[in-house]
Image (spheres, coloured by chain):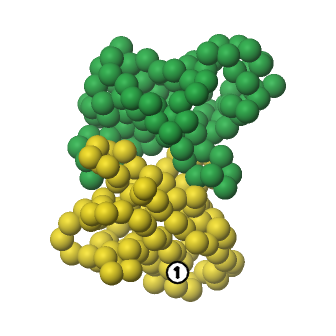
Amino acid sequence: AQSVTQPDIHITVSEGASLELRCNYSYGATPYLFWYVQSPGQGLQLLLKYFSGDTLVQGIKGFEAEFKRSQSSFNLRKPSVHWSDAAEYFCAVGRGSGTYKYIFGTGTRLKVLA
Amino acid sequence: DVKVTQSSRYLVKRTGEKVFLECVQDMDHENMFWYRQDPGLGLRLIYFSYDVKMKEKGDIPEGYSVSREKKERFSLILESASTNQTSMYLCASGARAGYGYTFGSGTRLTVV
């Protein structure tokens, strides 16, 4: 069965430091992959997506992610974190024949220290 | 520029009540979804709809039903609310596969 794992429940970084959030998936074919961000009390906002082509994907708010087929990973990165990046981040994978049905990871909560 | 609107941000209901959560999208998307979000469990799919009057069960449909009479509106119904349905409910819509979803701001439902 398809699955998505975000191994880090909480991550704390200092403002200005670099960030990497991990996402691993289990899927038989090349999946559709997404990263979403959720600010407190809000819905989810799409940061970036991958379904083919260049394996390094640029998103909004200065984020990027790299698809590595050999590692079944789609890690999210940002070179310099801002205090406003504090939020919860979700990785998602498109699954099955109806790939508009996604599986979401359990999320990584990011705390940014001033 | 709000695209997916959920009618209530916060809702408090009593056990046994029938509860309606409404969601409207203005992007002409075929697909609409209802998720619930609980700490440590991520997002779990309750129901989705791929066309007007069409629906399909997600991973946790028990205790819920849905209605989609118009393309832009997707309603989640709790037939008899229970305390274990206290949660954040998120509506989303999407067009073709691979394009991602647009989410509403969520409804935090408390059943007392």
In the picture, the quarter occupied by the C terminus of chain A is bottom right
To which residue does mark 1 refer? A19
Residue beneath the point at 39% across and 29% down: B56
Which color is chain A depicted in?
yellow
- Chain that bears disc 1: A
Task: List x then y, in percent, for residue A65.
Answer: 37, 74
Residue beneath the point at 26% across and 40% down: B95
The chain shown in green is which? B
Task: List x then y, in percent, for residue B86.
Answer: 71, 33
Farthest front residue in view = A1
The quadrant where residue B2 appears? top left
Q: Would residue A36 be seen by someone viewing this image from the given angle? A: no
Residue beneath the point at 46% across and 36% down: B58
Q: Is residue A54 above or below residue A16?
A: above
Give, as a three-letter code, the residue at label 1: Leu
Seen from the viewer's position, the closer of residues B61 and B18 is B61
Q: Would residue A16 be seen by someone viewing this image from the given angle? A: yes
Residue beneath the point at 46% across and 59% down: A3
In the picture, the quarter occupied by the N terminus of chain A is bottom left
Q: Is residue B55 above or below residue A101?
A: above
Lateral position of residue B61 relative to residue A93, left or right: right
Secondary element type, mark 1: strand
Task: List x then y, in percent, for residue B110.
Answer: 74, 30
Task: List x then y, in percent, for residue B47.
Answer: 46, 31
Estimate how packed mark 1 is, as few (under 14), some (14 to 19) or many (20 or more) residues with alpha carbons within 10 Å. Answer: some
The quadrant where residue B33 appears? top left
Lateral position of residue A38 relative to residue A65, left or right: right
